Image (spheres, grey):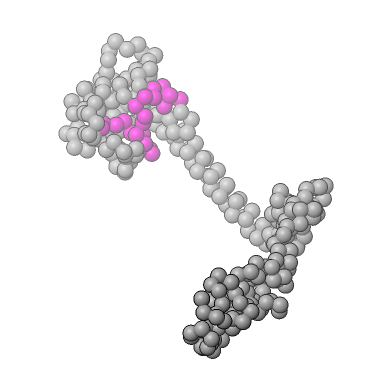
Amino acid sequence: MLFGMPRLGRRSPFYPFRAAGTWWRGAHAPCTTMAELEIGQHCEVEDCGQLDFLPFVCDGCSGVFCLQHRSQAAHGCSEANLKSGAVKPDHHKSFLCTYKGCDGKELVPVLCPSCGKQFCFRHRHELDHECEKLEIPKPRMAVTQQLVKDIVDSKKEATVSKRGRGAKNSETAAKVALMKLKMHASGDKSLVQTERIYFQVFLPKESKEKSKPMFFSSNWSIGKVIDFAASLANLKNNNNKTTAKKLRLCHPASGEALPLDQTLASWISNRESPLNNGGNVILEYLDNEVQFLENATSYIE
């Protein structure tokens, strides 16, 4: 070792001191500082002021700090208490419902948009708390609604009365026609007289004959009546095939295709639109989804 040179591994008091942030060129001469290169920023803590290449920006006060003072607690952030206090819920405060007789409480305010009063979730709607600001329909509107209701009710009553008169008239005509049908009707001769129901059966429009008088048992289902009528009139009957058109027995007034599983007696005793002993019925081919025959009256005219 040369005389006057410092020993490696320890700093000699005679060794020239290098300030923080200073670059050295050789053993004794400093070169350009970091401040001159404008690299990094100084910590904003008053007692620190350290120059840092990658400073930290506080989320609270937006200040710039070094690694040691980067946390809000380390640099005594002025915004930390304000922000934490704003989001901290008050678990002791509750909001009472103002509806009469209700003692409900909520942890958050529930205000009515109309009257501005506080209510619980159960009474939050205007109708639930009988809101004083709730608009009541004007009397004129109520009168109009009642007038419309009266008109609709009167039309319903008129329709029912027409049906009643129509049923009575057709019943009288059927009694007269019954006497004529009994003289010429075809059917199962083994049926007792008390079970026999007579109809003038109007055949499908593609048939050669327009109609044929027949009688059936009142205990038969509509499906059996169709099968028996088809055999008497020599009509093609594909009711056992799913894809083909079905031969259906239709009501002469409404054109409704009668359900196959219902009995003939249930339609004779039907109050709204009965079939009359001695009246008319219609046989026609319909698609599977069709339940009504269009222009049913054209078959009888």
Residue 266 position in % (x across, y down): 43, 24
Q: Is residue 34 visible?
A: no
Is 232 magenta? The answer is no
Could you say which is closer to the camera, residue 58 or residue 40?
Answer: 40
The residue depicted at 71 percent of the width and 54 percent of the height is 124
What segment carries the magenta color? 246-269
Residue lying at 53% horizontally and 48% vertically, measured from the top left: 155
Left or right: 277 in relation to 88: left
Whether residue 187 is visible, yes or no, is yes
Relative placement, left or right, of 200 versus 77 is left
Above or below: residue 148 compared with residue 86 = above
Determine whether 220 is above or below 15 in the image: above
- Quadrant of res 274: top left
Q: Position of residue 123 (x, y in %)?
A: 73, 51
Observer-nearest residue: 251 or 173? 251
Q: Please identify the quarter of the rendering in which residue 235 is found.
A: top left
Q: As drawn, which residue projects farthest toward the right?
A: 101
